[in-house]
Amino acid sequence: MPDIPRKISVKALRAPARTPKLVIDTNLFVSGLLNPHSGKPAKLIEFLPLRQKRYQLLVSREIFREYETVLNRFERISPAKRKSLLAKIKSHSHWISPQKRFVVIKDDPADDKFLECAVAGDADFIVSGDKHLLSLEEFQGIKIITIDECLRLLR
């Protein structure tokens, strides 16, 4: 996943005083499982379960279904690893039921579900490697950040 140039200042990326609420795009969990011993997305998976309270993971049913569907496409990811990650997400997430639908990302409307969950859950950040989401930079006061920016926040 290529790095997308960012113009967000370090000051603008300060985590809130409380535990930050994150919506995490599917591509990061896939990358984390494909490269479990290296790679930045694996760090987010390491923080599950969220006992250390590094972040609160916000998930909607629609997002969770995408996690399941996409993870199951990758034969390189063992069924045990998929099942383990999905169980952690299922049990350690804050479940959100978005009531409002958005039509924002014309080139990939399926990505709108991440915006919907973030708004409904009052998220601080959406973490993604997806160019469609990252190009927004911010949506209704919610910053859309890369994995690098997220890991800086969670240190």
Image (cartoon, rainbow, N blue to C red):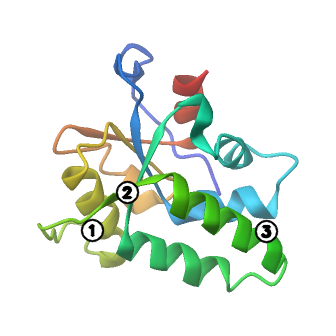
Query: Which residue is nearer to you in this view: 69 or 83?
Result: 83
Q: Which of disc 3 and disc 2 is earlier in sequence?
A: 3
Q: Is residue 61 left or right of residue 121?
A: right
Q: For the residue labelled by badge 2, is the local secondary structure a helix, a strand or a loop?
A: helix
Q: How far apart are marks 2 and 3 (CA)?
A: 27 Å
Camera-near label (2 vs 3) is 3
Residue kind at label 2, given as amino acid type: Leu
Residue 116 placement (x, y as % from top left): 23, 62
Mark 2–mark 1 CB contact (< 8 Å): yes
Q: Name the residue under label 3.
A: 81
Q: Is residue 11 left or right of residue 48?
A: left
Q: Mark 1 points at which residue?
A: 105
**Which residue appears at 45% of the width and 58% of the height?**
131
Q: Badge 3, how many Cα within 10 Å: few under 14, some, many 20+?
A: few
Q: Badge 1, how many Cα within 10 Å: few under 14, some, many 20+?
A: some
Q: Distance between the residues labelled 2 and 1?
A: 8 Å
Residue 127 placement (x, y as % from top left): 47, 47
**Which residue appears at 53% of the width and 34% of the height?**
150
